[in-house]
Amino acid sequence: MTSKKRYKSFTNTDELDGIKITPERKNQSEHINWFPGHMNKAIREIKAKLKMIDLVLELRDARAPMSTGNSALIEAIGNKNRLIIFNKSNLVDEKDLINWKKWLKKNSINFLFINALEKDSAQRVITKAKELILARHEGEVDAKKKEKFSLMMIGLPNTGKSTLINSIAGRKSTKTADKPGYTRRQQWIRVEETLELMDTPGIMPPKIATYKEGLYLAAIHAIPSKIVDEETTACFLIKYLLEKKSLEFQQRYNLNSLEVDYLTILPEIAVYRKCLIKGGLIDYERVYRIVTQDFREGKLGLHCFQYPKE
Ligand SMILES: Nc1nc2c(ncn2[C@@H]2O[C@H](COP(=O)(O)OP(=O)(O)OP(=O)(O)O)[C@@H](O)[C@H]2O)c(=O)[nH]1
Ligand SMILES: [Mg+2]
């Protein structure tokens, strides 16, 4: 719906000062949190099923490898064997991937970087999962004859758990959507006689450590816009891309310079993408949506918010 309040005059950029526009203008100590009741229930249900599971596949988003971990989930699975899968690696720069792989190897962590939409990734997950399960049973009588593998998919919302299950199964066995919190209940998916997978609802950490991490999670869409609005997410992203001097960002919106304040960028994008309404007013909501969506689809370059700790 069009409301006067949503639009600011393009010709008078001073008006921008009048509106709530940046994280700075909000309370910086503000905490971002999203932990609806069904997530608590989902943790209890994971614990209840662990006995039947050979290996837990923990899905994370490769654009925020640390912030998409969840200590509450790790605690819930206890000492169950775990493989960490960094999904959406097609949206991450090769250099970042190399750094992370080095760090993970050095720390003896079982991991894979994948793109859940690809068949080849699904195959790599199954091969590695079976390898880890058999290695744990090594030395046991009949270990090599283990005939049935039960895997459980866990992780934050929207990390691609259901998508990976469908790629492994080779059919649409569970529903997916670019909507955090889409899967609401556990579901077993039988891939073949010898392989079954459990889909689970995405679970957030009960407390997100810092405001910045909350913004990373909003940017990759692990948190819905009803919790962090698109204005906050888009302004954070624009500042991040300016700081990184992203040429893809500059080219996509035909920006004059990256050496400017992000407030200068908003009208530029609006003009270039025709987010204007009668009287030269800017539809800011549309600008925010375009930037957020383009970033999530990798159209503003390949990025990773976090670097491995030395
Ligand atoms: N670019 C890209 N998109 C992906 C990848 N994997 C999943 N997606 C997309 O991410 C969105 C979320 O996927 P889902 O599989 O529904 O995520 P989920 O982890 O099951 O989410 P919840 O059910 O909310 O916990 C969908 O739009 C997928 O198409 C990937 O490797 N690369
Ligand atoms: Mg799901």
Image (spheres, rainbow, N blue to C red):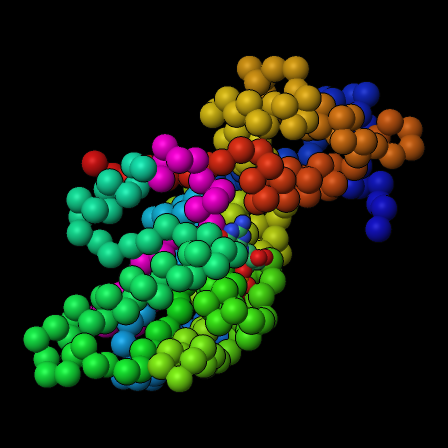
Q: Nearer the viewer, residue 273 or 151?
A: 151
Residue visible at 71% across and 23% down?
A: 268
Question: Which residue, as the protein is rendered here, is positioned at the far left?
Answer: 139
The extreme front residue here reads 145
Q: Is residue 273 visible?
A: yes
Tell me where residue 269 sits by quadrant. top right
- Residue 8 image position (x, y, % from top left): 79, 32
Number of numbered discs on residues: 0
Q: Is residue 74 above or below residue 222?
A: below
The verdict on residue 74 being magenta is yes
Q: Is residue 209 above or below residue 179?
A: above
Q: Is residue 290 left or right of residue 202?
A: right
Q: Residue at x 10, y 80 (%)?
A: 140
Query: Residue 130: x and y, percent?
Result: 28, 69
Q: Position of residue 271 (x, y in %)?
A: 78, 26
Judged from this view, the residue extending furthest toward the right is 278
Residue occupying the point 81% across, 21% down: 11
Boundaries of the magenta span: 73-97
The answer to whether any part of residue 34 appears in the image is no
Q: Is residue 242 left or right of residue 57?
A: right
Residue drawn 49% across the image and 75% down it:
38
Position of the C terminus by quadrant = top left
The answer to if 75 sits in the magenta stretch is yes
Q: Nearer the viewer, residue 43 or 171?
A: 171
Residue closest to the eye, 235 or 12: 235
Image spot of residue 100 (x, y percent): 30, 41
